[in-house]
Amino acid sequence: MNEFHLGINLLAILPEIGLVLLAIAILALDLYWPESRRRNIAYVAAVGLAFLATLPVIFSPDMIRNIDPEAFGNGLLWGGMVRYDMLSQIFKVMVLIAAALTSLMAIDVKGVGRKGEFYLIVVVSTLGMTLMSGAADLIMAFVALETTSIPLYILAAFKRDDNKSAESGLKYFLYGSFASGLMLYGLSLLYGFTGHTNLYSLAQFLNTETFASNPLPALGAMALVVVGFGFKVSAVPFHFWTPDVYEGAPTPVTAFLSVASKAASFALLARFFVAVFPESVVIGEQGLQTFWVQLAAVLSVISMTLGNVIALAQRNIKRLLAYSSIAQAGYTLMGVAAIQANTVDGQSQAVAAIAFYMFMYVFTNLLAFAVVILFSEATGSETIADLAGLSRRNPMLALAMTIGLLSLGGVPPAAGFFGKFFLFKSAVESGMVWLALVGVINAIIALYYYLVVIKVMYVDRSEDENKPIPVSRPYVWVLGVTTVAVIALGTFAAQPIFIWAVESAKSLFAA
Amino acid sequence: MSVDIEVYIALSAILFILGAMGVLVRRNAILVFMSVELMLNAANLALVAFSRLWGGAEGHLFVFFVMTVAAAEVAVGLALIVAIFRSKQSIDIDELHQMEG
C-alpha cells in the first residue's frame, strides 16, 4: 500500500467537504434566523454552491499531478474509493451549478422557498452526486447513489399536504428503492465473482477461464446493474416513474432531478462500464464491451422514439418536459453506445459528447423549468394551452422559453444543436450510422412538439393578456445566466469546451 | 461443521427472487417496501458469504453500508407512506393515480 498523503486526498474531496460545511451552515441559519429572514437562506445556498462549483476547476487534478506526481499516483485516492480525474471534476461542476441555480429557482415557490430544510436536502443530494461523479469502488458507487436518491425522494414529496406531491414521492421511492435493490444484487455478484470492490481491479479478475466458457453469471450481474442505471437516467423501459414524478413533484425539484441526477448518473455509468466491463474481458467468445454497447444502442433507440412520440400527446408542460427528458436520455445513451469506437480518441470523443450534452442540458432544461415555475406561480396553471399569449404578458419570459425549447430541439444557435451534433458525430465515427439516423429522425419529431409550445406562446390569444407575469430579481439572474450559457455553448464556447472535455475524457481510459 | 458457499448463494438468490416477486405482485405499499428490504438483505447475505469465501473484509464493510442505507430508506419510506395514508386513508398503490397520461 502506498503512503497516505493527506493533503492530496483532501484536495480530491474538497467540494464534498465544502458541501458538508454548507449543509451545517444552512441548518444553523434555519434555526437562528426568524421566519422573515429565511428567504435569505436560498441566497446563502446558491452563493455557496456557486463558489464550490469553481473548486473542481481551480484544483484540477492535472495541476496537482504536475506538482507531486508520486503522491498523485494513478489518481485513485482514499484507498481507491474515489478517482481524482478531470472527467469527474467536469461532472462535479455540472451538478454544483445545477444545485445553485435550483436554489435560486426555489426562492419564491410557495410551500418550498422559505423552508431552510429544502436547501439542506438539495445540498445533501448534491453531495451524493459529486461523490457519484468520482466513485471508483462498488461500495462508494452504491453509497453515493443512495445519498443522491434518498434526499430526492423527500424532495419529490416536499409539499406533503399536496396529494400529487406526496404521491409522486411515494412512487419515486418505491420504484427507486426497487431499482437500487436490483443493482445492489448485481454489485454483490460482481464482488462475489472477483473478491474485489475496486472498479479498476474488477475487470482483470473477471478475465478468467471460468467466465470465458460460462458467460451467464457475468451477464446476469451486468443486466442487474444496467437496470439500476436505466432507472436513474430514466431510459425506456425503466422510465415509467418519470412522468408522474416530474408532474407531481414541486417544479424546482423536477428541474433539479431532471438535470443533476441524470448528469451524475451518466458520469458513474460511463466510468463503471468502461472500467468493469472492457473489451479485453472475453466471455462466450466476445468482449464484454460488445454486450453493453449494443444494449445501450437498443435502449437509446427505444427511449428516443417512445419519449418523443408520447410527448406529442401531452397537455401538461411538466409532463411534456418529462417525456422530452426521457428522449434526451435516449440521445445521450447514443454516446454510451459510441464508446465501442476502436481508438482511444474515438472513445474519448464519445464520452466527451456525453459530458457536453449533459453540460448544455443542465442550462437548457433549467431555463425551461425556470419559466414554468414563474408561469405556474403567477397563474397556478401548468397546462400548455394556458401559455397562450405569454409573449404579450411578458415578452422576455416567452423569449427565454423559446430559446430553451429550441435548444432542447437542437436548433442552432442554441446549445442543443452542438450537443446533438457531437453525439451523432461520435455515433457515426464508431460505425453506428443507423443509430445516428434514428437520432436525426427523432430530433425532427421532437421539434414538432417544441414548436407547438412556441406557437401557443406567440400566436394563440388569451383573455388574460393584460395580466403581466412578474419576474423577481433572483429569477432574472437564473434566466440571465442560463440564457447566456445556452447561447454561448451554442456558438463560440462549443468548440473549446468540447476539446477540453475530450482531453478530460482521456483520463477515463488511461490505466 | 461448515456449509458450502453454494448453499448460501442459493438461499440468497431465493430470497432475492421472493423479494422481487413481492414488489411486482403486492399492492400494499408497506408490503412492497418489505419486499424491497428482503432484496437488500438477500444481497447482504450474498456479500457476507462471498466475503468469507475470499477471506477479505470488503464484503463485510459493504454490508455495514447497506444496512445504514436501508435504515435511512426505512425512515424516509415510512414517512412517505404515512403522508399518503393521511390524505387518502389507504396505502393501496393501485389507488395512486392522481396523474395520468
Image (cartoon, coloured by chain):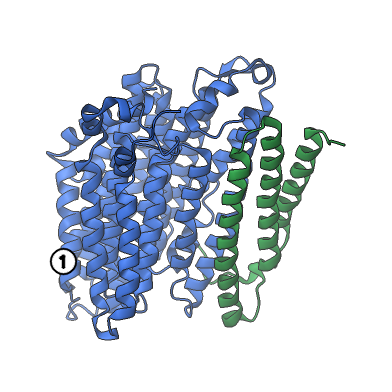
- Residue depicted at 50% across the width and 67% down the height: A168
Q: Quick check: A501 above or below A104? A: above
Foreground residue among A268 and A370: A268
Residue A122 placement (x, y as % from top left): 37, 62
Circle 1 residue:
A476
Q: Quick check: A504 above or below A254? A: above
Residue B55 placement (x, y as % from top left): 67, 32
Using residue A274 as the reference point, say whether residue B68 is left or right of it. right
Q: Chain B is drawn in which colour?
A: green
* Displayed quadrant of residue A35: bottom left
- Mark yes or no: residue B46 visible: yes
- Residue depicted at 71% across the width and 54% down the height: B38
**In the current view of this chain or complex, which residue is farthest to the left?**
A492
* Screen quadrant of the C terminus of chain A: top left
Q: What element carries label 1?
A: helix
Q: Number of marks in the image? A: 1
Using residue B5 as the reference point, say whether residue A20 is left or right of it. left
Q: Chain A is drawn in which colour?
A: blue
Foreground residue among A264 and A469: A264
**In the current view of this chain or complex, which residue is farthest to the right?**
B1
Using residue A441 as the reference point, say whether residue A141 is left or right of it. right
Residue A457 placement (x, y as % from top left): 24, 65
Amino acid type assigned to the residue bearing label 1 in the image: Val
* Displayed quadrant of residue A348: top left
- Residue depicted at 58% across the width and 19% down the height: A207
Foreground residue among A364 and A153: A153
* Displayed quadrant of residue A114: bottom left
Residue A225 placement (x, y as % from top left): 56, 39
Q: Quick check: B53 above or below A258? A: above
- Mark yes or no: residue A423 visible: no
Foreground residue among B51 and A276: B51
Category of crowding for the residue at label 1, using alpha-carbon neighbours closer than 10 angstroms: few (below 14), some (14–19), many (at least 20): some
